[in-house]
Amino acid sequence: MSVLLWIVAASFVGGVLSVLCAALFALNARAHWVSGLVSYAIGALLGAVFLEILPEAFKLGSNYAAISGTILVGILLFFTLEKLLIWRHCHHDHCEAHEPVEPHAHGRSGSMIMVGNTFHNFVDGIIIAAAFLVDVQLGIATALAIIAHEIPQEVGDFMILLHSGYSKSQALLLNLVSSFATLLGGVLAYFALESMQSVVPNLLALAAASMIYVAVADLIPGLHKRTRLRDTIEQVVLIALGVSSIFLVNLTVGA
C-alpha cells in the first residue's frame, strides 16, 4: 500500500473512529469508561513519543540541539496557545472555560469548541502524514496514539455541544464534519512535505512536543482528582497498557 493511501486511511478511519467512539461514551454517559480511556491515552501518547517519534527524529536529523530546542519551543507554544484559548473564554469573574455551559448558547461555547477542534484535527493530520513519510511503522504508532487521545477529547466536545443546545444528531454530525480536517491536513502535508524532507525531523519534534504537552498538562492533572489506592493502581496499569500497545505495534509492524 502506498504512503499516501496509508495517510488517507489512517486520517479517515482515525477521525471517524474517534468521533463514533466518543459518541458512544457520551450518549451512554459512562464516566468511568472515559476516565479509564484517559489513562490509556496518556500511555499511548508517551509511548509513541519516547519509543517511536523522538528516536526517529534524532535518527533523521543530525542537529540534536535543534531538535531538542524544537521540543522545548513546542511545549511553550502549546502552553501559550492554550492560555490564549482560556483567556478568550474568560470575562471578568465568569469563565466559560471552567464553568458549565448555559443551555442554548449556540453562538458561544459550541461554535468555539468546533473551530478549535477542527484546527486541532487538521494539525493531527499533518503529524500523521509526517510520521508515515518517515516510516509506516512510525505512522501506525502515531495514528494509534492520536486516536487514543482524541476519543476522551471528543467526548468532552460532544458533551459541550449537547449542553449548548444541540441535538444528539447535530452534535454527531458536527463532530464528524470536523474530523475530516484530519484527512485534509494529512493529504496537504503529504504533498508539501515530499519536497521538504529536511523539515521532517523538526516537525516530528513538534509533534512530540504536542503529545507530551497534552499528556502531561491536560490529561495527567485530571487523574490526580481520584486519590484512592484502587484508582491509582488502575491508572498505572492502564498507562502501562497504553505504552505496551505502542511497543506491540512496533513489534508487529516491524516484524
Image: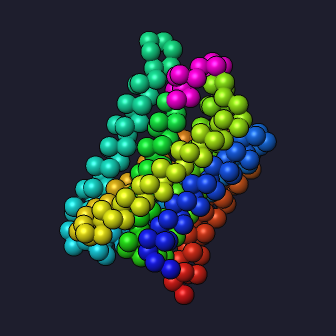
Q: Tell me the residue at 52%/29% (across/down).
A: 111
- Residue 15 in percent (x, y) is at 57, 54
Question: Per the image, is 103 magenta?
Answer: yes
Residue 10 among those drawn in magenta: no
Vertical order, 228 against 7 (above or below): above
Residue 139 in view (yes/no): no
**Residue extending furthest toward the bottom:** 255
* Quarter that holds the C terminus: bottom right
Estimate the x, y position of residue 53 in percent, counting from the top left: 41, 67
> Residue 109 is drawn in which quadrant?
top right
- Relative image position of residue 48 (x, y in whole percent): 49, 65
The secondary structure that dominates the magenta segment is loop
Query: Which residue sits at x=50%, y=71%?
Result: 6
Magenta stretch: give its range.
97-111
Q: Is residue 135 above or below residue 148?
A: below
**Horizontal and vertical percent for residue 59?**
31, 76
| Camera sees residue 151 | yes
Name the side, left or right, on which 74 lies relative to 101.
left
Q: Residue at x 56, y 45 (%)?
A: 177
Along the viewing direction, whichever of 227 and 13 lies nearer the viewer:
13
Horizontally, is 231 left or right of 196 in the view? Answer: right
